[in-house]
Image (cartoon, rainbow, N blue to C red):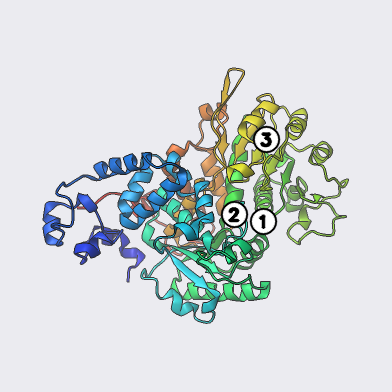
Amino acid sequence: MTTFSTIREETDMETNLTGFALLEDPKHNRGTAFSREKRQEKHLIGLLPPAVETLENQVKRCLFQLSKKNNDLEQYIYLAQLADDNQTLFYAVLATDPERFLKIVYDPTVGTACLEFGHIYRKPKGMYVSMEQKGKLREVLKNWPVEDVRVICVSTGGRILGLGDLGTNGMGIPIGKLQLYTACAAVQPDVLLPVLLDCGTDNEKLLGDPLYLGLKQKRPSTDELDAFVQEFVDAVQERFPKCCIHFEDWKGTDAIRLLARYVNQISCYNDDIQGTGSVTVAGLYNALKISKSSLKDQRVLFLGAGSAGIGIANMIASAMKLEGLSEKDARARISLFDVNGLLEPSRKDLSPDQQPYAHTAKPAKDLVAAINELKPTILIGVSTVGGTFTKQVIEAMSKLNDRPVIFALSNPTEHAECTAEEAYKFSKGNAIFAAGVQFDRVTIDGKSYEPSQANNFYIFPAVGMAIVATEAKHVPDEIFITAARATADQVTDEQLAKGMLFPPQTDVQKASHVTAVKSAERIFELNLARVEKPKSIDKLITSLEYKPIYEG
């Protein structure tokens, strides 16, 4: 069994594997980079071409092969196979161009991959824990070979991106999320475990698909689900006592309920709620530097009142409280609008999580009317409905604000509430814009604008590294607000002048290191760490970072 305390040492240590078994082990395989001496020692003579290559040359070959792929899904499949074959080479390829490859191994391409997951499946990754195993989850988790897992990313596939219930096809999300832990923040791959908690699916198309790999049954009742999750949580605490559970892409009501239940009990967080809230707050911090105002003075209107909307609203309220507002006053500055209109007290269909944002106001089912009534300074879209920020909506925001802040955060691309070009065009270039996907540079009347992507990968990998380094007992919103501030502060004045609200994606590894250090410092300040505070937190983080190189 492998423990975290020896992972760095084991990376450098000799493995007992030889021959084909060594070539099929992704952690230790070097392929054509095995020296002649190692080929002799490890019984690889004749199993590899004669040339002995450097890692750099292997990367060049991979980049050439990727250039021949016809589309992003084909590149995703290629990189998935590469990760299965040679872990070091996989991460070395990603490191050559994070801006290019993060959108291949994760959003938006991972959405397409999840839709096709059962059809493109080749080799198992992580663990599939199904309701057929109820009562036996402790034994099931013992089958994982790493003794000291530090982060589990777990999904039920209940709400994958903006694609809905994909059941076991959603396994692409935990796999991709954890790859970003390593690609962005250099968390050691061995301490990460993707898990699909298979509770069935209500997707009739999948239930009728002969290549679907999950349980072919409908989803259980809330009580049954909660009991199954409790057994899973208990099993994780016993099997991996220093592990943080990262909940990802659960159905909205389940996500909010379970986070509230466990956030103060165990080390856990929900990236859809806290991570999305954090990266949004990071973007707002910088948007308000441009408009020269403070967060506590803003009026925020959301289009979308699901788990993402509520999560971001809660995070903004928490950040406003740090600027001196009471919780009541902070929430009073935030309103939400959904498919049934503005959230206000006459609505009888509101959940307990929505009710704190149902302020006294004139009922409205038209977004432009709500904007004119509430006069928001910030408009945030988490509706998953493309094109809902129409010309009329953006013009209404522009009439009220010299520099309207417009965040169209839904993804994939076709679900974005508006494009960057629409936001800039309809606001006459005055919008401060960010999206959940990356749009290309926009030029209007000779002036160029650099659209920002409010991508969670600026936040959760760094927070994950901080959790691993500190063995954090809990992960409250304060950690994510610290991460938001740390991320925002890394954007230069020159970049802000171009409309950039986040660090360049090419610098995501450098940015994640800084954010991880700041987040770890906050964990120690809140007395949530289970390790002694070192003299240098920066050196602690650096000592734990994974590097995609062949040692020795």
Name which quarter of the figure residue 224 lies in.
bottom right
The mark that comes first in sequence, 3 or 1, is 1
Q: Give the amino acid at mark 3.
A: Val
Q: Which residue in the structure is indicated by mark 3?
A: 405
Q: Which residue in the structure is indicated by mark 2?
A: 272
Q: Is residue 186 visible from the viewing direction of this image? A: no
- In whole angstroms, how far apart are the C-alphas of marks 3 and 1? 21 Å
- In whole angstroms, how far apart are the C-alphas of marks 1 and 2? 8 Å
Nearer to us in this view, 336 or 412: 412
Q: Give the amino acid at mark 1.
A: Ser
Nearer to us in this view, 100 or 377: 100
Q: Is residue 414 visible from the viewing direction of this image? A: yes
Q: Position of residue 462 (x, y in %)?
A: 47, 50
Q: Decide: few, some or many residues near mark 3? Use Cα within 10 Å; few <14, some 14-19, many ≥20.
A: many
> Is 144 displayed left or right of 515 in the figure?
left
Nearer to us in this view, 81 or 363: 81
Q: Secondary structure at mark 3?
A: strand
The mark that comes first in sequence, 3 or 2, is 2
Q: Position of residue 198 (x, y in %)?
A: 54, 69
> Is 33 displayed left or right of 296 in the figure?
left
Name which quarter of the figure residue 199 lies in.
bottom right
Which quadrant, please, contains the N terminus? bottom left
Q: Secondary structure at mark 1?
A: helix
Q: Is residue 36 above or below residue 62?
A: below
Q: Which residue in the structure is indicated by mark 1?
A: 307
Which residue sits at x=36%, y=54%? 81
